[in-house]
Image (spheres, rainbow, N blue to C red):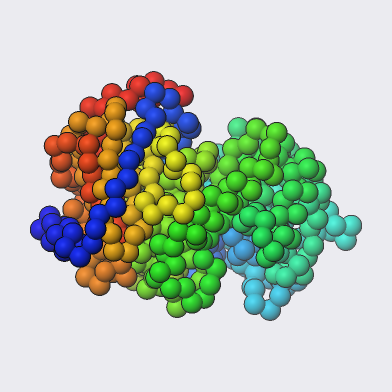
Amino acid sequence: MAAVRDFLISTAIFSVCSSFQLVVETKLGVFAIPRHFLSIASSPKTPCHDRNEFQKILHSGRFTSLVRGLSPAYWRVGGTEGQEVSYYSTQSECKSAGIENGEHMKKDFEPLCLTQIEWDELNGLVVKTNTTLLFDLSNIKRHKDGTWNYSNVEKLLNYSAAKGYNIAWQLGNEPHAYPDHFNVTVEPKQSVDDFKTLRKFVRARQIIVGLESTNPYEVKSDVENYEYLTQWISSGGLQFVNALSWHQYFIRNPNPTVEQMHNASILDSLLLSIQTLKSCTKGYKVDYWLTETGSILGSDAVHNISGSYAAGFMWLYKLGLAARMGHSVVCHQTLFTDSRGLMDPTNFTPFVVILNSYWVSYLFKHLVGSVVLNVDGQLNMNQSVRSFAFCTQPNDTAIKRSYMAGDVTLILINIQTEKPATIQLVEPLSQFNVDVYLLTPGIGGITSNFTLLNGDKLEMSMDNQLPMITPTTQANSQTISLPPLTYGFYVIQNAKAEACLSTI
């Protein structure tokens, strides 16, 4: 706590505080998010291509504990590489079919074999980690008449049904880009026919999500994708899926800067994207899933930024805004083995570097409940302090406090580089005790690769136990102070918010 106190004193000396009034609507919620709202994602390449690495994952108690710390969740396995996957009973069958599998692919892609062994192991791992598999099926194999050649997918579906696996399914990945990636064109109407075919194979209770579209915000670079999405919707695609799924990254730049990670206009681009998505689906009843997303889409060269405290600004804001704007699932891309991961594994055992966005996710999962509350003005553009409000997750065993129904969790993000923020709460949330979970960077400032919770380093024990989340308590909730370039969670105790005492 001393580190936080010194941080507050030093910023107060050199800066003048900005004051903000926070008005939270506590009588009615605006949306309800499920417990699997915050979910995870990874490529199929590890189980399909790197057998040794996958075995390390399967037998790593540390990995299992980390994933369970974010459960329940969907675990999406897919992406562009998901379109390279073909299923075969044995490795020998897979190898003999390699040329056929790769016939559509350009030279920078390679076919991936998913055998029965890896499939069984993957499904066992999702059960072990208390997650639900969201698997991305390929539809790049086409007959001469352009229809989907689903023979290989049918084998996987039949085997999974026989085993009784609980799986949610996707089909395809960013199909507007197929001509560039795979020398294949699948028109929007053809894609709708593919989903109609998949629905015939999949049991009625199983979930199908699509289209796996990229950012629909209608700017010049995304016009092609925007048109593909709108044509897919107008062709009837939504009637064959349980949720409309899409992808978004704040920064698609191989050389991002730290300043971009807390830039107001870049953060606001997510709101514009969601508003565009909703305009595309106006008149339809739609469940929205953001199934591939993160802060930066870039190579390993951006690892120091994407794994740093700075990445937490974008990730926490994305979680808050997506919930406020009616999304049921948000999958962080990726879970591991990537510059954008929640963890950076070194052979998975005995050491795993836990990156900052993991700790943001961990606190969100255990402090945020199901009901989203409205904050006045929170959807305005160009704000220097971002705020979200939720009913608190009651009686969570990862928290050192036992919260009750009616308590309120605030998420506050100060993107001002020099000014602390003073947040003034008004009735009915003033005059209560507030538990503070302030996240600040370690040594090196916002480029630090570790995070402090109320001044103490967040880390996993050597016996694979995640830390108990411990707050400090502030006696009066009327005023909350937030240092510059920091973020945190604040639980208003005994608030008895009406929206949190009933269901939406």
Residue beneath the point at 24% across and 58% down:
16
Q: Return the residue found at the far front.
A: 16
User: Residue 503's image quarter?
Assistant: top left
Looking at the image, residue 382 sits to the left or right of residue 405; the answer is right
* Residue 286 in view (yes/no): yes
Task: Count up the numbered dots.
Answer: 0
Q: Position of residue 36 (x, y in %)?
A: 44, 41
Who is closer to the viewer here, 391 or 97?
Answer: 391
Image vertical order of residue 19 relative to residue 405, above or below? below
Q: Position of residue 470 (x, y in %)?
A: 18, 46
Residue beneath the point at 45% across and 78% down:
301
Q: Position of residue 467 (x, y in %)?
A: 21, 51
Looking at the image, residue 127 sits to the left or right of residue 457; the answer is right
Image vertical order of residue 369 relative to residue 254, above or below? above
Q: Return the residue found at the far right.
A: 145
Looking at the image, residue 87 sits to the left or right of residue 468; the answer is right
User: Residue 204's image quarter?
Assistant: top right
Residue beneath the point at 39% across and 29% down:
25
Q: Quadrant of the N terminus?
A: bottom left
Who is closer to the viewer here, 10 or 77?
Answer: 10
* Residue 462 in view (yes/no): no
Residue beneath the point at 23% across and 44% down:
480
Image vertical order of residue 27 relative to residue 139, above or below? above
User: Residue 257's image quarter?
Assistant: bottom left
Q: Position of residue 418 (x, y in %)?
A: 29, 63
Who is closer to the viewer here, 133 or 416?
Answer: 416
